[in-house]
Image (cartoon, grey):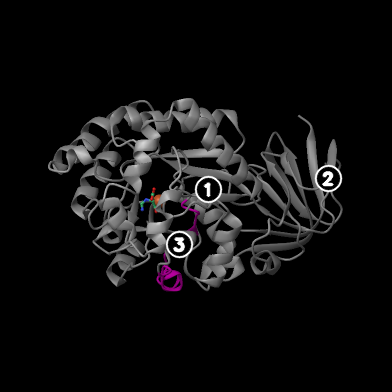
Amino acid sequence: MPRLVLYNIGLLATPLGTAPKKGIHQKEISCVKNAWILIEDGRIVQTGTGEPPKADESMDVKGRLVTPGLVDAHTHLVFGGWRQHEMKMKLDGVPYLEILKAGGGILSTVRSTVHSSKEELKEKAAKALREMLGYGTTTAEAKSGYGLCPEEEYKQLEVVRELAKEQPVDLVSTFLGAHALPERYKENREEFVREVAEKMIPYIAENKLAEFCDVFCEKGVFTAEESRVILEAGQKYGLASKIHADEIEAIGGSVLAGEIGAVSAEHLIVCDEAGMNSMAKGGTIACLLPATSFYLGAKFAPAREMIKKGIPVALASDFNPGSCPCLNMQFVMNLGCLKYKMTPEEVLNAVTLNAAAAIHRADVTGTLEPGKYADILIWDAYDLNYIFYRLGSNLLAKVLKKGKVVIDYEKTC
Ligand code: NIG
Ligand code: FE
């Protein structure tokens, strides 16, 4: 297999290892000047400084900044339609959960998704993935949750499975059947919980349609007890747990996350002391979604307190048609610094290694080290602070996925 060497890397900034960084280690980044990376078969063979080794091909990085590809550990990638018709309500101050209660919000996207063919959903998600890759996302999680009935949930997960084979961004699937209570179950919520736990989860596990199970644990959506039933059913069938918790009200989701050893809890805008203690004890990663806080005009999660408590912090986009129609992880990185008061080093960990750990991919991506995929970003920058300081521009020069250049902004057209 031909070997490729990237040389003249002005600054190689990467976390190291496969374990998520927490507490004082959240800021640990290896920064090496004048570095090179040797790649073979899509993986990193060796890294070093100074004179690069001989290889079949070489690429001059021209003294610029190189980091691992970004990992977006929380997206609702597959959905039909958009929700621009809710903009007026949003501007008039109608709360997110009120829109949902009136049959809009998630339920409106469920209707558009159910009315879309698999091909239509696939085309739309593929377009989003191309855009994500263009902003530096080389691995992404993708949730279902706009079907709310067996066939439609499976349809969304099948779309993810097909896309995983057909385009460069690595995908990790999460079953989010309990994303909202379907209108037909309004008077019979126990039966829906049972259907998710006893019918959908076994089918999804058997057909390997997802690796994770998630629930929207929120006031007026699913209670902590219902979430426990669903997540424990998932665990019984080999689906690791994630939970949308404490986004609008803290009703026990983050406490539950720690108790059941959830891999990650997401949002956590109003996470309290009890929730943080439970997550720290259970080894749960806090997957924070600052672009959603920004878009909803909500508070920002207490990231600094979480770091102080020794909870590993990951940041993700939450790309979805309602609370965050944004897939730009560079914007998420800006918000991590500006709104969470995290340092550039802490944020870099949060969008690479910790995010990879939140989707069980830290063995293959999230850092630039021998053995890992050559998922590499070459930035139009020379130091780390610059990419957090600039706002609203795409600061990438090239994106490499498994050693291949998949985006090149330097090519003139
Ligand atoms: O993570 N909060 C629940 N689910 C999504 C929003 C989905 C939607 O509004 O369509 C979220 O923010
Ligand atoms: Fe979400």
Question: Regarding mark 1 in the picture, which secondary structure is present there?
Answer: loop
Q: Which residues are magenta?
A: 299-318
Distance of label 1 from label 2 (alpha carbons): 26 Å
Question: What amino acid type should be assigned to the residue bearing mark 1?
Answer: Ala
Residue 357, horizontal then vertical, whole percent: 48, 51
Question: Regarding mark 2 in the picture, which secondary structure is present there?
Answer: strand
The answer to whether residue 332 is left or right of residue 148 is right
Residue 9, horizontal then vertical, whole percent: 79, 56
Q: Earlier in the sequence, mark 2 or mark 3?
A: 2
Which residue shows up at 64% across the image and 50% down it? 135
Query: Is residue 151 visible to the viewer in this orientation of the structure?
Result: yes
Residue position marked by numbered label 2 in the rendering:
59
Q: Earlier in the sequence, mark 1 or mark 2?
A: 2
Q: Are marks 2 and 3 in contact (CB under 8 Å)?
A: no
Q: Are marks 1 and 2 in contact (CB under 8 Å)?
A: no
Mark 2 nearby-residue class (10 Å; few <14, some 14–19, many ≥20):
few
Is residue 383 shown above or below 158? below
Mark 1 nearby-residue class (10 Å; few <14, some 14–19, many ≥20):
many
Which residue shows up at 69% across the image and 51% down it? 377
